[in-house]
Amino acid sequence: MRQSSRAFILRHTRLQTVDGLDGLRLHLADDVLGLWHAVHRELAHPDAALPFWAFAWAGGLALAHYLAENPEVVRGKRVLDLASGSGLAAIAAGRAGAATMAGADIDPFSEAAIELNARANGVKVNVISRNLLDEAPPDVDVVLAGDIWYEQPLALRVLPWLQRARDHGVHVLVGDPGRCYLPTAELVELAAYDVNTTTELEDLALKQARVYRLR
């Protein structure tokens, strides 16, 4: 599956720089909705998930900006990027000097996307393709959680999991543009960034996204 997924991604995306992130490059789709239909055909699955891995989402962009400005947060540390998608936040951690980076995502195409994007940026990201929310938080120093508050069932599972990680000494950073289920009462804002997105999937091309830590 990985080889065919890699070929699919290369066929439907274009390697391009990410605005404002000093040479960071990702394989991104110019027509995300067209790609979504292609995913449906490729998997023969009309309810296949949106290709989150083909888009630089606002929360991940905010995390990447924050790590570029504050590399000491991850320098020399073990980092997990939860619901990694394209691997953007994990790659940003690698560029900031993290010792190891892992990207966790259950999308069948995400593993190949993370590997392709990591290679394009000269970093190594280990991919975890199982659902980590079914397990205890792993032994890492930092968890990055970008753009995971878009639906209630997921939000209700993610928050306790992140809190358990925090209680075991893990530094948890959340990146989000203020989606519906963001648990703002549980968060402390650290920074805000204006980031370029796409109106195919967001309501505005320029959104303000914030980085938080858990209380």
Image (spheres, rainbow, N blue to C red):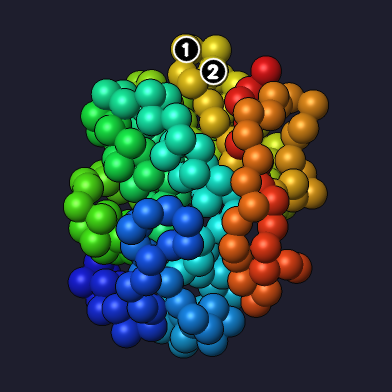
Circle 2 SS class: helix
Establish if 126 lies above or below 144.
Answer: below
- How many neighbours does mark 1 have within 10 angstroms: few (below 14), some (14-19), or many (20 or more)? few
Side of 121 relative to 48 (left or right): left
Q: Which circle marks residue 166 in the picture?
A: 2
Q: Residue visible at 46% across and 69% down? A: 54
- Residue 17: percent from the left, percent from the top? 38, 66
Q: Nearer the viewer, residue 184 or 24?
A: 24
Q: What is the three-letter code of the residue carrying label 1?
A: Gly
When the figure is inspected, residue 9 is found, relative to residue 112, above or below; the finding is: below
x, y percentage for residue 188? Answer: 69, 24
Quadrant in the picture for the C terminus: top right
The residue under the point 52% across, 49% down is 60
Return the mark for residue 187.
Answer: none
Mark 2, other Cα within 10 Å: few <14 / some 14–19 / many ≥20: many
Three-letter code for the amino acid on which mark 2 is drawn: Arg
Side of 173 where 81 appears, left or right:
left
Relative height, residue 149 to residue 15 (above, below): above
Q: Which residue is mark 1?
A: 169
Name the residue at 38% across, 83% down.
12
Q: Are marks 2 and 1 in contact (CB under 8 Å)?
A: yes
